[in-house]
Structures are given as structure tokens and as C-alpha cells.
Image (tube, rainbow, N blue to C red):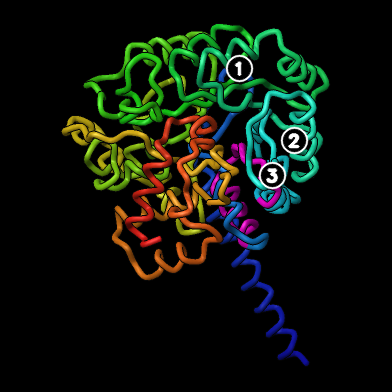
Amino acid sequence: MKKFYTFLLAALCLVAVGCKQKQAETSERQTAMQYRPLGATGLEVSEISIGCGGFGKLDSAASRELMTMALDSGMNYIDIYDADPTVRSNIGYALQGRRDEMIIQGHLGTIFKDGQHTRTRDVEETRQGFEDLLARLGTDHIEVGMVHITDSFEDWEEIQNSPFLDYVFQLKKEGKIKHIGLSSHNAEVALQAVKSGWVEVLMFSLNPAFDRLRGGATPWDKGAMENLQAGIDPVRVELYDYCTTHKIAITVMKTFGGGGRLLDAKTSQLGVAYTPEQCIAYCLAKPCISTCILGIDNIDELKTDLHWLHATEAEKDYNNVGNRELAQQSGDCTYCNHCSPCTQGIPIAKVNELLDKAETEGLTADLQAQYDALPKHAGDCTHCGACLSRCPFGVDIPSKMDAAKAKFGK
């Protein structure tokens, strides 16, 4: 019996040591994470944070594992633009018991309709979408209510003095959102928005390639990426300076060029590959930037992104990369699904994603199998043009369908 208690005591000591070691490792990771003010909101956010897209590709257990690693590593900010119930429910489950550790940037005017994520300015639809978000997250509020994608002056003017904006203000008054934000890919629209006085947080597409656009061009305008110039666009300079001076936070989307394009020389809009560390360092060099929101599809991608916490200054140096020859690319699809529903039932975003992979990585048996398994194929496209009016980024979708048909054979 004495030997048993001796053994038990030794085992308990080992467990205690293990727990202390795990706590020390967690503490070290959290200490490594750096935090920045979220503008004038009074919140402090991690320099790198989580995009929501990957949660639609994971089950609940994998979602929980990813979120736990992110939180344990010090990430405390997440953007939730997608209205897909699977995405929202997976995030809600992953945050159970740790909701107070995460600052949530949720989008207003984004709903799940006809089986897909859709933007709206209708008040009742917006209300239903927001209440669904709270319910699936298991919370009674979010920290930042983000007016979803405002890329044109027409949309900006439509929002002003509208029932939609009244509802946004009402949510803040009721405490269901603590701060108001707006997302945009258009520097001129974004500049006017931050000068309105009610935008506290701007979600903006920013990276070494997009900064070379000119004026009000968005990355998705036809021909825009063919006319990149040396140096940062003067409108963007004014935007960043204004946000810095007036303490308006910028949360960065498309940190890696949209779909990770800047990370591969074959797809990089600048014709040369950047590393994740270089892209992040480029954005965070601007004092108005609060956090870089990273699209994370799985635990391995998260581990890769977390290398930022221990990256050397040499690994973060982006200067030599940024001076190389510009690439000539335009009309890139971001697989956002705004183009759907297709009149022929083609899953357009998935077709474009598989086509882009086949063109950059080569047509593999796995890609062909994924394409063959789709309910409808690019060859079913009738060029009706219905999708073109809904695409916010000016992608020539019929031409993409023709290319996919040629690549995959149907």
C-alpha cells in the first residue's frame, strides 16, 4: 500500500509539472503576441486575427481546435462577414466558454438567401441576419458592427439617411453593437466614409499590390491590376493619414492579396512571391492599422501564420521584394458567391476556384475529380449575364466559364 501511495504521489507531481509547463508555454505564446489600439474604441486587438471563411470547411470539433489554438496564442479578434449558418454555428461552438476573450467584428447587411451568402440593405432582412448571427454565436452583442461592402459612391449615397443606417445606429444605442464600422475596397469611397464622423473602424483591402492602384479603382475593376504604379496611391496615403490623425482603426482584409495570391509568384499581382511575414509587416508598418485579418482554412495554416510571433526582422523585410517588376493581372475572382444563384445552377465560385488552382498548380486527378463531382459544370453556362450584375468585383464570369470548360472538358 505504501508503494501505491508513493507511486500516486509521484504521478500527481508529474501531472502538476506538466500543467505548469503547459501554462508557461501558453503564457509565452500570449506574451509574444503584440496588441494595438482599435482606433479610439478603447479596445486592444492582436496584430494578427482570424477571418471566418475557413470555418465553413471544418466540422465543429476542428473549428474548436482551431479557435482554441488561436486564443491560446493570443489572437483576440475575428471578422465574421459570412452569413452561412455553418460558418456562424461553427464559430459559436468554437467560442463556447471563451466568448469574453474574443472581440467580434460582425457584418450588417449580410444574409443567407437562396442557399448562399448575399448582401442586402433591406432593414428587415438585415435585422433577421443580425439576430441569426447573435443566436448562432450564443451572445447578446458584438463589439464592432461592420456595414458590409460599400465600394461605390452610389451605394454610399443610398446608405445616407436611410432606414438601414438608422437601424445600425439603433443597434449601437441598444448596446447590441459597441462600435460602428464599414468595409470597402475603394479608397475614394473609404475616405469619404471615414470623414462622415460615424465610422469608427474601417475594414479595407490593403497589401503591397493593392496600394499601387490609383484613385477609386478597386482590385476587381477590369484592367485595374494592369495599371499598377510605383509607390502608394495618393488617395490611399490621404486615407491612411486621415485615419491615423483621427484615430480611426483600419482592420486589414486581403492581407495576402486575396486568396493568398501574393504568396505564389505564379499568381502574385506583383509577379513575385511574398512571405506571410512580409505581407503582415507591410501592413503593420502603417500606424493606422490595428490588425491583419488572415484567412485560415485549417490548423496547419494557423501554425504557419503564427510564425509571425517569432519571425526575425530579416524575415519581415519586404523592401527588396516590393521593388520588383509588376505583374499584369486583372479581374480576379475571390470566390465570395455574390454572383449566385446561377440561372443554370452552376456553382460559379467553386468552378472559378478549381480553375485557378488548375492553372497555377496544374490539372491534377484530384482537381478533375472535384470538378466532375459538381452538380453543374462550366459547359452549362448560357452566357445569360445574370451573374455579371451581381459580381462586386467586375469578374468576366462567362469568359471564366469558357476557360473552365476548355480546362476540364465539360
Q: Quick check: 60 above or below 344?
A: below
Q: Nearer the viewer, mark 1 or mark 2?
A: 2
Q: Is residue 148 found inside the magenta-colored segment of the image?
A: no
The 10 Å Cα crowd at callout 1, few under 14, some 14 to 19, many 20 or more, is many
- Which residue is tagged 3? 114
Residue 17 found in image quarter: bottom right
Say which label, 1 or 3, has the lower sequence index.
Answer: 3
Q: Amino acid at mark 3?
A: Asp
- Which residue is tagged 2? 129
| Whether residue 34 is visible | no
161 lies left or right of 259: right
Q: Position of residue 384 (x, y in %)?
A: 50, 39
Q: Nearer the viewer, mark 1 or mark 3?
A: 3
- Which residue is tagged 1? 200
Mark 1 to mark 2 CA distance (whole Å): 22 Å
123 lies left or right of 77: right
Q: Residue furthest left?
A: 325
CB-based contact (under 8 Å), mark 1 and mark 2? no
